[in-house]
Image (tube, grey):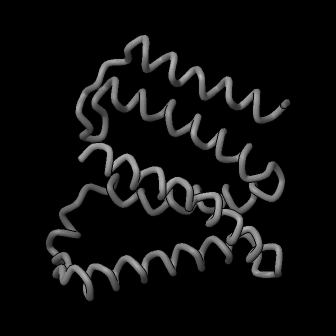
Amino acid sequence: MHIILMLFAFVAGALQPIQAALNSQFAQRGATILWAASISAGITSLTLAASALLIWRLPLPSIRLMASLPLLLWTGGILGAVILGTMTVVVPRLGAAMMFTCFLAGIIACSLVLDQYGALGLPHQSLTIGRAVGAGLVFVAIVLVRFF
């Protein structure tokens, strides 16, 4: 099962540079960076809502539930906007490979910290030598992609 989930993650990751390039093209053709990212996020929201309602037949969350959630949980959308906007700006300037190598390094660095402390409800996973070396290799990849 882990292999299948890893393959799903790999495919989703492979879609990210395509999405970034498409959003960048959208912005370069006159939509501007903020509108390109906004439209992409809107289409994402509509796609997810339609899937939840029409394919998975999930009920809408209650207003009571939504009102009871901590404010911190609502910041995920703000983070998504920062991520989409950054991709839209950076890809045409650095290229997809450089942007996503840096993106991956940021993901791994933050993930290691979150895992180490069990932050945001994640299970605690200690920073081991192997994990640290793996993260270090991603930073080596930044140098290799940038200069070679």
Residue 109, how many percent across, how many down? 51, 30
Instruction: Report the residue at 34% width, 52% height from top.
Output: 72
Task: Judge from the rendering whether residue 118 lies leftward or rightward of residue 35; answer left or right.
Answer: left
Q: Residue furthest top?
A: 129
Instruction: Report the residue at 24% width, 40% height from top.
Output: 121
Residue 118, how many percent across, how many down? 28, 30
Instruction: Report the residue at 68% width, 70% height from top.
Output: 23
Task: Judge from the rendering whether residue 54 lies leftward or rightward of residue 100; answer left or right.
Answer: left
Q: In the rendered image of this protein, does residue 24 appear above or below residue 30?
A: above
Q: In the rendered image of this protein, does residue 80 appear above or below residue 36?
A: above
The quarter of the displayed image where residue 142 is located: top right
Task: Judge from the rendering whether residue 69 lies leftward or rightward of residue 80; answer left or right.
Answer: left
Residue 58, how many percent across, how many down? 18, 79
Q: In the rendered image of this protein, does residue 104 appear above or below residue 77?
A: above
Residue 147, how many percent across, how many down? 85, 30
Q: Nearer the viewer, residue 145 or 30?
A: 145
Quadrant where the C terminus lies?
A: top right
Instruction: Report the residue at 66% width, 39% height from top.
Output: 102
The quarter of the displayed image where residue 87 is located: bottom right
